[in-house]
Amino acid sequence: MDSPTSTGGSSARIVATRSSVMESIRGCGLSGVRIDKEELKRKLLIPEYLRLAIRDSIKSKDPDAVADRCFNSGELNARYEAPDGPMVIFVNSKSGGRHGPELKERLQQLMGEEQVFDLSHVKPKEFVEHGLVCLEKLASLGDYCAKETREKLRIMVAGGDGTVGWILDSLTTLHQRGREPVPPVGIIPLGTGNDLARSFGWGGSFPFAWKSAVKRSLQRAISGPVCRLDSWHVLVSMPCGEVVNPPYSLKHTEDCALDQGVEVEGQLPEEANCYEGVFYNYFSIGMDAQVAYGFHHLRNEKPYLAQGPISNKLIYSGYSCTQGWFLTPCISDPCLRGLKNILRMHIKKVNCSEWEPIPVPKSVRAIVVLNLHNYGSGRNPWGSPKPEYLEKRGFVEAHVDDGLLEIFGLKQGWHASFVMVELISAKHIAQAAAIRLEIRGGEWKDAYMQMDGEPWKQAMSQEYSSFVEIKRVPFHSLMINGTGDSV
């Protein structure tokens, strides 16, 4: 083991297992009393004129004109009342295997088509920039119903972690432009890992009894407490001329300003090509990202192989065995596969302005920077270190809104496997409020990275260094806690 963790006897493990099972059941919406469909509908359904105004604003991309039309038609004098839990739902109909389209149809029957958006047709940014703006415009014209609907609005996302991150990222513009309040987000888990959903009590998988579970999930989303979630900005800077095919979560940016005060080992290019994005769960570099990258492309080339979460996990496990993570070729020195050969790491601690160098262990072949307690379909690789161990290492107990990231290493597939079944904890490296990675070429031509499940291949120059800089976004994202408990 790389660190001591809190352990108990067999009875404690049985209690913990039962607790985990019950939490999963509650998260999937399988417990509780029967929910009346019509009563739930009354709580959720936004008045028709507002639903149509939101829809028309998104279609026309002219919310001001739609709001003025509603105002001139006299709708504002109708004295409609806002529902107790106004809500819109985004559905990734490509997630959840065959359940995605069925779920969308079920939700539209419950709430009307105008409150349920298929992400293949309506993008979150369109809703934020046009649909919400229309509500805000109507509120400014004196429509109390629109004002109250906007203030109470909550958002549910039916999809995986990547889909949830997409929604959260789109909502950040509300913070940036001072358009408060920002709607909190709940989750109907349709992805493979669903670590965001697990972390906030929405369950780890799409339940078999989904028709009744959906109603309970919506009921909890109306009144569930709102929790804060740290968001982390990533800036990737590379020499101009290097080719990279970034994931959706990374966008090209002209702002390539890296923090100063760090000694650079390689040469700095005269011109840099930069991408930026935000993650909520994890960023990783190394062998785990390489496996994810290969699986991602295999699934795109042969979609018939992956029809749901279970088949995805089986194929992923099989694919990882073919990539040399478990067995390094005999002609190769295992140490040559370590990230230490291409990577230098600096961190900033809380309330500290100086960068501190952190040695990369030579045995580590993957480094994961983690924000949540859950990683890799509900595992906790950081573990539950004892208080005396935390004090000795200068660590604190991990929370999703503490402004800190947990950095740990995985050595090889066998080590990662034992970590994932929680027989041991991962190799603890550091806790940090900001991270800077310098990636230098040499024998390696490419490095593999991923954030929140979206992998990419990063070309490396033999002459110049590339950089990854991670800092906390100044505002929190807001999540609905599906269990009703504090996180």
Image (cartoon, grey):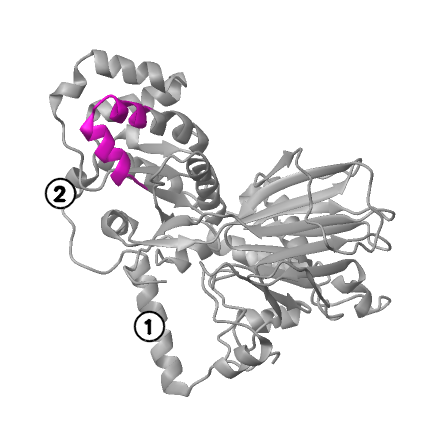
Q: Main secondary structure of the magenta part?
A: helix
| Quarter occupied by residue 101 | top left
N-terminal of the pair, mark 1 or mark 2, is 1
Query: Which sits in the foreground, 209 or 388?
Result: 388
Q: Which residues lie in the magenta part?
A: 134-154
Q: Is residue 321 visible?
A: no
For disc 1, the marked residue is 19
Q: Quadrant of the C terminus?
A: bottom left
Judged from this view, the residue extending furthest toward the bottom is 9
The residue at which mark 2 appears reads as 39
Is 137 inside the magenta-drawn segment? yes
x 37%, y 52%: residue? 206
Of 53 and 446, the residue lying toward us:
53
Residue 263 in percent (x, y) is at 78, 56
Q: Residue at x 41, y 59 (%)?
A: 199
Task: Name the kind of residue labelled 2 in the image.
Answer: Glu
> Position of 321 compared to 14: left or right?
right
Residue at image x 66%, y 60%? Answer: 354
Q: Give the camera-side residue of 299 and 239.
A: 239
Is 38 in the magenta? no
Q: Where does the image place residue 308, in percent across and percent down from the top left? A: 47, 49
- Dot 1 crowding, Cα within 10 Å, few <14, some 14–19, many 20+: few
Rounded to the nearest angstrom, the CA distance separating label 1 from label 2 is 31 Å
Q: Amino acid at mark 1?
A: Ser
Name above or below for residue 227 compared with residue 1: above
